[in-house]
């Protein structure tokens, strides 16, 4: 069941009570659906939109308020959808525009919002604009990307691609190169050319008209590149002494990016109910510049610190401060399709899972939104994907130096004792680890001690408490290796240590994580005692 959230965060900057009260997204729980791996309706081994629709009741019973769908547009899948060939369609592997319509309609019927991913930094090299730019050197289309002449056979500057190697590829038999901050199949758009912002205005309007409740914006701060395309200065590396690019020399994050979001926010403002923008921005300093009343609503407070109480406290405070001058709250998250699953990061196996349960409780009690990455509610670990089955461009373009991100993208296990843990009768696009059978949704749903049952209970409680929880939280004195905070009637304690702890603190009348000696888990959920 989706929970209506009526919290009243501090109001500044002339936002009316009414506007804040009706903000469905504040304190909402979102669920990131990695479309290719969520649910496969036609048993071809690849997830699809009708598959998601068929699992909406599962998502409702989990208690989420909104979904974020990763890109489902037509794409050659060189970066699994983040290489878009047509911003107005649905990849046939994933379904049709009608399937998108049904998904939105069915989600809305269950009170679940649907955010879609928008990829404005780059297109696919198979996008008609880029194909026209290459065919016969069409200047008008070339001006929509970054083409530049090389320097004596070398790229136009020393910028690097996030996937390894230069951020430039030379055209065959020509002196020009084109820029791509990611894979060569993802040429960067030139946001200085007014045709580009105009096109994206059309694209977002198109999807808003089809019922999208907002957008997760891919590499949100990168749109405009440094205009002079100057080399990044090189400095000696701190340890090796080898030349390395200097930090603090911005090639992205130009002031004009803010104009784009002001413009988009204005467009969103013409729709009812409220639509939202979530930027793929993890840096707290940047978040404070982009999360504003007239720009983005949210960005990701990514909790990827080592398992240490003071490191987590610091990170929580840094992200809280980042939004303190806005009317927004942090959007806590621990995993997504680009990072190693947090059960594994936190130590793996039983220990990692217990810590992941504790960290979820710690974060779910905080003021703000929470983004679940699919499978997190099952306690899934990073899967081993045999090298010959890996598809991630990060693995491919670094020649295997980076293991890639396939391990966190392996399809969902739905049913025990079925081929591929019930995801598909055909071999899934990434293989299901044999041990995942025991993680399957149906098995976990039957067990009251499973991670899934814990998530369901906590989200239900959170929903029940929503009206009574203030936007403010206060840290309380806590023993070493422990964090305790109060938020109105709610008290949360989390034990980061190895030994059980006895707390003097009463659990108040909220739900709390109590830490008792002799428990197998470092945390326990205490239900309301009224
Ligand atoms: C961020 C996305 O989350 C990631 O999966 C993708 O590879 C890059 N942006 C490039 O679009």
Image: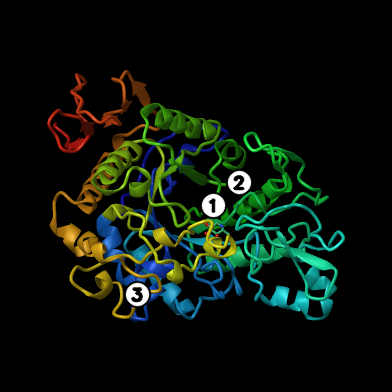
Residue at 31% across / 21% down in the picture? 480
Q: Which mark is residue 40?
A: 3
Mark drawn on residue 295: 2
CA separation, marks 3 and 2?
A: 36 Å
> Is any atom of residue 131 visible in this view?
yes
Q: Tell me residue 358's x, y (percent).
A: 28, 39
Q: Answer above or below: position of 59 versus 133.
A: above
Q: Nearer the viewer, mark 3 or mark 2?
A: 3
Q: Is residue 112 above or below residue 305?
A: below
Q: 26 or 266: which is nearer to us?
A: 26
Image side of residue 499 versus residue 404, left or right: left
Image quarter where the C terminus lies is: top left
Q: Residues within 10 Å of mark 1 (few under 14, many from 20)?
A: many
According to the picture, the residue beneath numbered tag 1 turns out to be 277
The answer to whether residue 33 shows anywhere in this view is no
What is the CA distance from the residue labelled 2 to the residue labelled 1?
Answer: 8 Å
């Amino acid at each position: 069941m989706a929970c209506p959230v009526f919290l009243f965060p501090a109001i500044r900057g002339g936002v009316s009570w009414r506007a804040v009260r009706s903000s469905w997204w504040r304190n909402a729980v979102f669920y990131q659906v990695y479309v290719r791996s969520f649910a496969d309706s036609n048993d071809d081994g690849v997830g699809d939109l009708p598959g998601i629709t068929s699992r909406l009741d599962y998502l409702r019973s989990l208690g989420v308020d909104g979904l974020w769908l990763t890109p489902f547009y037509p794409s050659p899948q060189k970066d699994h959808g983040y290489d878009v060939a047509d911003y107005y369609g649905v990849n046939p592997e994933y379904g049709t525009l009608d399937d998108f319509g049904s998904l939105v309609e069915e989600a809305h019927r269950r009170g679940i919002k649907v955010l879609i991913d928008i990829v404005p930094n780059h297109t696919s090299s198979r996008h008609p604009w880029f194909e026209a730019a290459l065919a016969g050197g069409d200047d008008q289309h070339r001006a929509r990307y970054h083409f530049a002449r090389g320097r004596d056979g070398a790229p136009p500057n020393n910028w690097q691609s996030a996937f390894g190697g230069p951020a430039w590829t030379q055209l065959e038999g020509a002196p020009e190169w084109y820029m791509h901050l990611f894979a060569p199949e993802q040429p960067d758009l030139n946001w200085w050319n007014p045709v580009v912002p105009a096109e994206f205005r059309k694209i977002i309007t198109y999807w808003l008209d089809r019922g999208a409740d907002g957008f997760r914006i891919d590499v949100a701060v990168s749109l405009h590149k440094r205009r002079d395309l100057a080399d990044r200065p090189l400095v000696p590396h701190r340890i090796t002494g080898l030349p390395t690019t200097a930090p603090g020399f911005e090639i992205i994050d130009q002031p004009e990016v803010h104009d784009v979001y002001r413009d988009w926010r204005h467009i969103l403002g013409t729709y009812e109910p409220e639509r939202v923008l979530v930027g793929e921005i993890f840096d707290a300093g940047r978040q404070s510049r982009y999360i504003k009343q007239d720009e983005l609503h949210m960005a990701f407070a990514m909790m990827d610190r080592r398992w240490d109480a003071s490191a987590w406290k610091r990170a929580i405070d840094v992200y809280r401060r980042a939004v303190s001058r806005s009317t927004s709250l942090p959007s806590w998250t621990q995993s997504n399709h680009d990072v190693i699953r947090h059960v594994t990061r936190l130590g793996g196996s039983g220990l990692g899972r217990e810590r992941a349960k504790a960290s979820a409780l710690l974060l779910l009690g905080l003021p703000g939104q929470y983004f679940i990455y699919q499978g997190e509610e099952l306690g899934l670990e990073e899967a081993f994907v045999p090298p010959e089955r890996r598809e991630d461009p990060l693995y491919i373009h670094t020649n295997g130096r980076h293991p890639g991100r396939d391990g966190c993208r392996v399809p969902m296990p739905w049913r025990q004792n079925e081929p591929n843990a019930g995801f598909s009768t055909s071999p899934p696009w990434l293989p299901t680890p044999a041990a995942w059978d025991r993680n399957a949704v149906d098995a976990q749903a039957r067990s009251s001690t499973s991670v899934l049952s814990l998530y369901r209970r906590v989200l239900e409680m959170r929903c029940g408490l929503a009206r009574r929880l203030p936007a403010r939280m206060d840290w309380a004195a806590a023993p070493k290796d422990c964090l305790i905070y109060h938020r109105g009637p709610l008290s949360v304690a989390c034990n980061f240590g190895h030994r059980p702890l006895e707390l003097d603190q009463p659990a108040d009348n909220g739900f709390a994580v109590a830490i008792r000696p002799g428990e197998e888990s470092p945390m326990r959920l205490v239900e309301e005692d009224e």
